[in-house]
Amino acid sequence: MSLRIKKGDKVIVTSGKSKGKKGRVLRFFPDENKVVVEGANLVKKHKKKKSESEPGGFQEVPLPLHLSSVQLFCSNCNRGVKTKIEIAKDKTKTRVCKKCQKTV
């Protein structure tokens, strides 16, 4: 699918129970077309206490979202945007917001 979203990018969730939440991409699974976004799609996991320092109980863990459910967030436009890739003369690729023409 689209490899325009990378680890560390700021994205906004466009559908599902976490719609409207913004966060950074923690992990990216290109084979499955899924991303893990911090603070989005959280579920409670039951964890067993393994040591004195690591507590047990309920922990909220983010699960992967499909790439079609997230959009790259443009801080200039303050919304989720589509991007295009521009190639400079020195053959470097940059992602550019289609709305405001700024580098994302």
Image (tube, grey):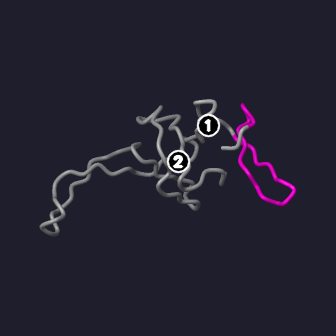
* Disc 2, SS: strand
Residue 46 place in picture, x, y as percent? 21, 55
Going 59% across and 34% down the picture, which residue do you hit?
80
Quadrant, the C terminus? top right
> Is there CB contact under 8 Å for labels 1 and 2?
no
Q: Residue furthest left?
A: 52
In the displayed orientation, state which residue is furthest to the right.
Answer: 89
Mark 1 to mark 2 CA distance (whole Å): 20 Å
Mark number for residue 31? none
Query: Visible in this render: residue 1?
Result: no
Q: Residues within 10 Å of mark 2 (few under 14, many from 20)?
A: some
Looking at numbered disc 2 in the image, what kind of residue is underneath it? His
**Magenta span contains residue 94:** yes
Q: Which of pointers 1 and 2 indicates the residue nearer the eye?
A: 1
Work out whether residue 48 or residue 21 is closer to the camera in this orientation and state it: 21
**Bounds of the magenta segment:** 83-101
Q: Which residue is mark 2?
A: 66
Q: Nearer the viewer, residue 46 or 50?
A: 50
Earlier residue among tags 1 and 2: 2
Q: Which sits in the foreground, 64 or 39?
A: 39
Q: Examine the image and state in which quarter residue 3 appears.
A: bottom right
Residue at 56 percent across and 49 percent down: it is 9
**Residue 24, x across and y down, in percent:** 49, 48
User: Which kind of residue does numbered mark 1 sit on?
Assistant: Cys
Q: In the rendering, at what x and y percent does residue 60 appear?
A: 29, 48
For the point 45% across and 35% down, the residue is 21
> Pointer 1: what residue?
74
> Where 50 sits versus 63, above or below?
below
Residue 88 is one of the magenta-drawn residues: yes
